[in-house]
Amino acid sequence: MLLQRAFAKINFGLRVLRKRPDGYHDIETIFYRVNPSDEIFVTSSDTIAFECDDETLSTEVNLVRSAAELLQKTLGIRRGARIILRKNIPVGAGLGGGSADAAATLRLLCRLWDETPAEETLSDIARRLGSDVPYFLGTGAAHATSRGEKLDYFHLEVPYPIVILSPEIHVSTRDAYGAVAPKSREGSDDLKTLLTQHLGLPELLGGVLKNDFESPVFRLHPVLRELRGQLLDSGAVFCAMSGSGSSLFALYHDEGPARSAMETFRDRGRLFYTPPRFRPDLGIVRRQQVD
């Protein structure tokens, strides 16, 4: 049985630039992996079988099953797989859990089936599954454009502890896009430039890294605006919403205030801690069985 951990992501800035003729939107953002992570296990089977410990997720219609079936069809594979998903990343919280799980499934099944498709083939499958899925096939941070699938990976070390707060609020991505007003940023610096220039003074990040979804989502869910203010009051030097929400992430200069915030906000939602200079382990390992 093979295992891989699928880590969540946050967005350092998110610009919604324009609506495309195909109905999607052109965006610009920076993807960065953080805790928490899901665990995906695969083993040989005659058919595609999927299990999940989260009873709210359908075992028949989900990105993991779709990834397995699309890979199987694209490569002409006759074998199946038993896929077990252990969820820890909140669903519908702007942390990319479903996309991370789908990408991990593609990698794991290629290993299980002893297939080595071209990276472009895997990337094409990932794009068909969802705009965020291609990012999770790679490593490191990435400057993303187009629908989010055009990726420029780069090395990024965030030297600050990160606290993620995921309140029990589900934000529909469709509704968020319906409420946001696209705005062209022609002539302005790209988000990668702004992030790398200001990372040494994180107090300035709030003035240059904007998430265009924040205003409309905060109008729909005012408690998120309140929580953002409270996280800043707790000592955070930067706080923003990830993706289309509802998760908020906060950067702290030191681990002490970050750990205190984990205690302060423990009743306000699910909390996750990412240490400074976080390097997620994305390796595939072999297990005899699921623990």
Image: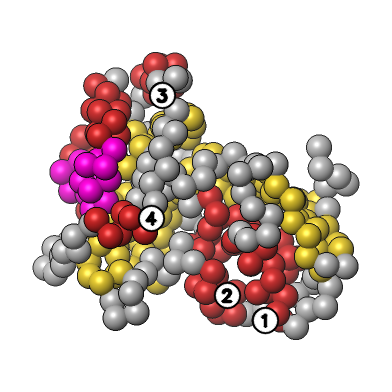
Which is the main secondary structure of the residues drawn in magenta?
A: helix
In the rendered structure, find residue 173 and report the number of the disc placed on it: 4
- Residue 21 is situated, as x and y percent measured from the top left of the image, at 29, 81
Q: Earlier in the sequence, mark 4 or mark 2?
A: 2
| Amino acid type indicated by mark 4 | Thr
SS for tag 2?
Answer: helix
Secondary structure of the residue carrying tag 4 is helix
The image quarter containing residue 269 is top left
**Mark 1 near mark 4, Cβ–Cβ under 8 Å?**
no
Q: Nearer the viewer, mark 1 or mark 4?
A: 4
Who comes first in sequence, dot 3 or dot 1?
1
Q: Residue 223 carries which label?
A: none
Reading the image, the residue beneath label 2 is 125
* Badge 3: residue crowd in 10 Å (few <14, some 14–19, many ≥20): few
**Kind of residue at badge 3:** Arg
Q: Within 10 Å of the Cα at label 2, are there few (<14), some (14-19), or many (20+) other Cα atoms?
A: some
- How far apart marks 1 and 4 lie (CA) works out to 28 Å
Quadrant assignment for the C terminus: top right
Q: Residue 74 carries which label?
A: 1
- Foreground mark, 3 or 2? 3
Give the vertical position of 278 relative to 31 (above or below).
above
Numbered range of the magenta stretch: 205-221
Q: Nearer the viewer, residue 66 or 255?
A: 66
Confirm whether residue 281 shows in the render.
no
The Cα atoms of the two marked residues, 3 and 4, are separated by 22 Å
Q: Which amino acid does label 2 sit on?
A: Ile
Report, in whole angstroms, how far the alpha carbon at label 3 lies from the one at label 2. Answer: 38 Å
Q: Which of 69 and 121 is in front in this view?
A: 69
Relative horizontal placement of residue 270, taking residue 81 as reference (left or right): left
Q: How far apart are marks 4 and 2 (CA)?
A: 21 Å
